[in-house]
Image (cartoon, rainbow, N blue to C red):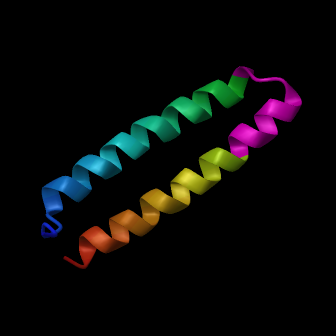
Amino acid sequence: MMSMLSRQTLQSCIQRCQATANDIKSMATDAPAPAKQSLDQAYQSIDACIKQCQDALNKI
């Protein structure tokens, strides 16, 4: 049986993703150039995910 999406569950997921995004951004600061580029791309991806999840949160 599928559980209904709750605001609390989605907010918790967003917070975990934001913490991960902050970790990635921090690691990118000290990374050598090739790794920094990959970490910057990872940050952009998770940031887009966070924004879409926040949009979903606004719709429930």
Of residues 27 and 9, which is closer to you in this image? 9
Residue 33 is one of the magenta-drawn residues: yes
Please identify the quadrant where the N terminus is shown: bottom left
Coordinates of residue 48 in the picture (x, y in percent): 54, 61
Query: Quadrant where the C terminus lies?
Result: bottom left
Residue 25 lies, in percent from the top left, at 60, 35
The x, y position of residue 43, in whole percent, is: 61, 46
Q: Is residue 24 left or right of residue 54?
A: right
Relative to 19, residue 47 above or below: below
Q: Residue furthest right?
A: 33
Residue 9 vs residue 47, the one in the foreground = 9
| Residue with the most extreme top position | 30
Instruction: Name which residue lies at 71% across and 49% down.
Output: 41
Taking 32 as reference, is 1 left or right?
left
* Magenta stretch encompasses residue 38: yes
**Residue at position x 72%, y 20% in the image:** 30
Residue 52 in which image quadrant: bottom left
Q: Which residues are magenta?
A: 30-40
- Displayed quadrant of residue 55: bottom left
Give the side of residue 59 with respect to residue 42, left or right: left
